[in-house]
Structure formats: structure tokens, C-alpha cells
Amino acid sequence: MCQNGVNTGQYKMMLEQIDDQIALNRRWAHKLGHVAGDAGYEKTCELMHQVQHLLDDARALITDAQDALEEDAEAVANVSVKLV
């Protein structure tokens, strides 16, 4: 549905695509962290796991944005315009 010039269905789909991409990057950060750790690169391993945790935080924020989108769309839908 389009609200105030925003197609909320399409917007939600785009948020899901961002989440999918972040999930993929998180998996790669996790794998690369283990590769570095197995090779004895402890600092690199530690940093890659920090990247992994930051990507987890980003995914949580995307989920919050999806919830906020639904709330905002409901709030906007309750607005009525009257000709004066």
C-alpha cells in the first residue's frame, strides 16, 4: 500500500533484502574469523568476530526498522483529510 508517497510493501521488501545481505556478510565474517584463527592470526580472528557482532547489531536495527515501518504506516493510515 502507498502511504504519503511511500510504497510500504516495497519498502518492507527492501528492508528484508538488506537484512538478507547483512546475514550473508555475517556468515562470511564468521567463516573468515575461523580461518584466521586456525592460521594463528589471533588479532585478525578477534577483529572478524567483532565485525560479526556488529553485523548482528545491524540486523537487530533492521528488525526494529521493520517494526517501526508497520507502526508508522498504521499511524499515517489513521489520518483523515477534510476539505475546509
Image (cartoon, helix red, strand yellow):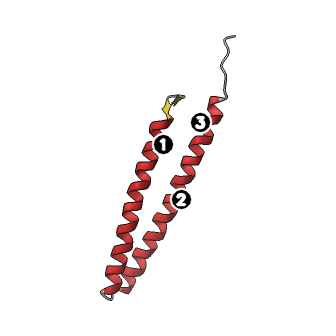
Q: Are marks 3 and 2 in contact (CB under 8 Å)?
A: no
How far apart, in angstroms, are the residues tagged by discs 1 and 3?
11 Å
How far apart, in angstroms, are the residues tagged by discs 3 and 2?
20 Å
Give me the disc on residue 60. Answer: 2
- Residue at left offset 43%, top offset 75%: 49
Residue 5 percent across, percent down from the top left: 50, 28
How far apart, in angstroms, are the residues tagged by discs 1 and 2?
15 Å
Tell me: 84 left or right of 49: right
The kind of residue tagged 3 is: Ala
Q: State whether residue 10 is above or below residue 59.
A: above
Q: Mark 1 — residue?
A: 12
Tell me: 73 left or right of 50: right
- Residue at left offset 39%, top offset 74%: 48
Q: State whether residue 84 is above or below residue 58.
A: above
Tell me: 6 left or right of 38: right
Residue 84 percent across, percent down from the top left: 69, 10
Dividing the picture into quarters, in which one does residue 42 lie? bottom left
- Give the mark nearer the N terminus: 3 vs 2: 2
Q: Which residue appears farthest toward the right when viewing the image?
A: 84
- Give the mark nearer the N terminus: 1 vs 2: 1
The kind of residue tagged 2 is: Ala
Residue 23 percent across, percent down from the top left: 41, 61
Tell me: 2 left or right of 44: right
Q: Mark 3 — residue?
A: 73
- The kind of secondary structure element at disc 1 is helix
- Residue at left offset 38%, top offset 67%: 27
The kind of residue tagged 1 is: Lys
- The kind of secondary structure element at disc 3 is helix
Query: 10 Å neighbourhood of mark 3: few (<14), some, or many (≥20)?
Result: some
